[in-house]
Amino acid sequence: MTPVLLLAAEKESAQVTDWAARIGWVVGLALFVALVYWLMREGWKWRGTLQGDLPELPAAPDDPGPAKLSLSGRYHGSTTAGQWLDRIVAQGLGTRSRAALTLTDAGLDVVRPGASDFFVPVAQLREARLDKGIAGKVLTEGGLLIVTWEHGDRLIDSGFRSDHAAEHNEWVEAINSMIETNTREGAER
């Protein structure tokens, strides 16, 4: 019985950690992650360069009139109309942010803290609808308020999500009614 105990006492446990190899792997992984983020940033800047012909975003008029509707929620981005994955990043339209929307007789005012605000005159509004997705954001059917508007020579879809999703239907009806009224008045002139 003594020789068995003696044998067990002579064994050493194997070294658990090879620190040089572990540090090498961690540094390699950190460099790879940094490279991926740099490539993503360069891709974002390249997309903005390609969309450089997009004109400056209109600012809200000094007196847009009384608010018909107000909404607080999130701005999820803008895409080329009808192409929900073709994100527009030029002029700050690719920046997600909180948003406060105000609909007046003059148009749609989008105030975004931390990002550039913009205004869509009523003559540029084309459609409002409920949808389930826009580049980078997919929700249940009808989870996003999509406003289609014309800017320069492009039709743009902008996606919003209210803090109270029940408001979306009211916004769709109000915007489409304004567009119809504006179109009818334009045709009568």
Image (tube, helix red, strand yellow):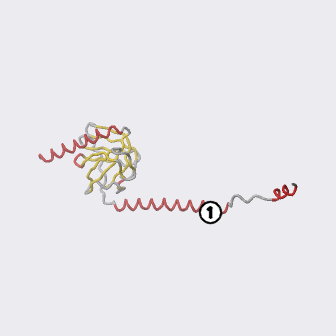
Measured as percent of width and height from the top left, residue 9 is found at 82, 56
Residue, far front: 1
Q: Is residue 164 left or right of residue 126?
A: right
**The residue positioned farthest toward the left in the image shown:** 188
What amino acid type is highlighted by mark number 1? Gly
Quarter of image, res 52 = bottom left
Percent coordinates x, y for residue 87 in the rendering: 36, 55
Mark 1 Cα shell of 10 Å, populated few (<14), some (14-19), many (≥20): few
| Quadrant of the rendering where the N terminus is positioned | bottom right
**Residue at horizontal 73 percent and vertical 60 percent from the top:** 14
Q: Can you say whether 153 is above or below 61 in the image?
A: below
Q: How many marks?
A: 1
The residue under the point 15% across, 45% down is 184
In this view of the protein, which residue sits in the foreground, 159 or 124? Answer: 159
Which residue is identified by label 1?
A: 24
Q: How far across and how far down the image is residue 15, in percent?
A: 72, 59
Residue at the spot x=37%, y=53% of the render? 135
The residue shown at (29%, 40%) is 169
Q: Residue 56: x and y, percent?
A: 31, 54
